[in-house]
């Protein structure tokens, strides 16, 4: 399977393609649906979430991986995840993988909000949707790359 550096490169390349498509739809094609949903704030929230997920929320959090180590002293937040999910088991399932990581992160964020007194209801829903979409897409790209690369390797 690809190493962390390869995963990061593939993910960033895919993100550039997505941003190119969004630019095409909103700037050149002037697609009305795209323009009404995709303003600069939505695109920024989406891109930042996608990048954050690429570096910190990889399905490889199920092992002592680079994304796991990037959490430094906060690694312990993902320790239960690593113990529960065997490598390339459910964490690499296209539905359960992203869902389980998003739930784990949501628990961490909820606790953080509770401790700092931030009211989640004040965050506009569209930004929560953009954040979740960015993170899930990044994880799907990881899962698909793992799948395709191990498939390709089996032919040689
Ligand atoms: Zn993987």
Image: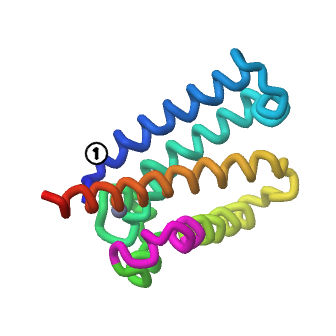
Q: Residue at x 60, y 48 (%)?
A: 134
Q: Is residue 40 magenta?
A: no
User: Coloured how?
Assistant: rainbow
Residue 140 horizontal side relative to residue 23, left or right: left
Question: For the residue labelled by badge 1, is the local secondary structure a helix, a strand or a loop?
Answer: helix
Q: Residue at x 28, y 55 (%)?
A: 149
Identify the residue at the far top of this view.
Answer: 28
Q: Residue at x 37, y 42 (%)?
A: 10
Location of the C terminus (image quadrant):
bottom left
Q: Quadrant of residue 64?
A: bottom left
Residue 135 visible in rendering: yes
Q: Please state the horizontal and vertical placement of residue 53, each as a whole percent of the image.
A: 50, 51
Q: Find out if the beta carbon at label 1 lies less than 8 Å from the nearest ligand 1 atom.
A: no
Q: Quadrant of residue 39?
A: top right
Q: Is residue 97 magenta?
A: yes
Residue 95 horizontal side relative to residue 27, left or right: left
Q: Which residues are magenta?
A: 87-100
Q: Residue at x 19, y 63 (%)?
A: 154
| Depth order, front residue of 42/35 | 35
**Mark 1 neighbour density, 10 Å: few (under 14) some (14–19) many (20 or more):** few
| Depth order, front residue of 146/108 | 146
Q: Is residue 58 above or below residue 24?
A: below
Q: Please state the horizontal and vertical placement of residue 42, each as a whole percent of the image.
A: 73, 36
Q: Is residue 81 above or below residue 132?
A: below
Residue pointed to by mark 1: 5
Q: Please state the horizontal and vertical placement of residue 57, each as a whole percent of the image.
A: 48, 58
């Amino acid at each position: 399977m690809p190493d962390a550096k390869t995963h990061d490169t593939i993910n960033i390349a895919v993100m550039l393609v997505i941003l190119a498509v969004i630019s095409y739809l909103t700037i050149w094609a002037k697609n009305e649906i795209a323009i009404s949903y995709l303003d600069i704030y939505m695109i920024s929230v989406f891109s930042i979430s996608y990048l954050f997920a690429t570096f910190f929320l990889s399905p490889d959090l199920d092992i002592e991986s680079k994304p796991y180590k990037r959490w430094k002293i906060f690694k312990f937040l993902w320790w239960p995840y690593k113990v529960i999910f065997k490598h390339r088991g459910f964490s690499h399932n296209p539905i359960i993988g992203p869902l389980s990581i998003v739930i784990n992160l949501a628990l961490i964020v909820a606790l953080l909000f509770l401790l700092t007194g931030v009211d989640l209801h004040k965050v506009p829903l569209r930004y929560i949707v953009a954040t979740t979409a960015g993170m899930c897409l990044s994880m799907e790209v990881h899962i698909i790359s793992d799948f395709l690369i191990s498939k390709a390797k089996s032919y040689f």
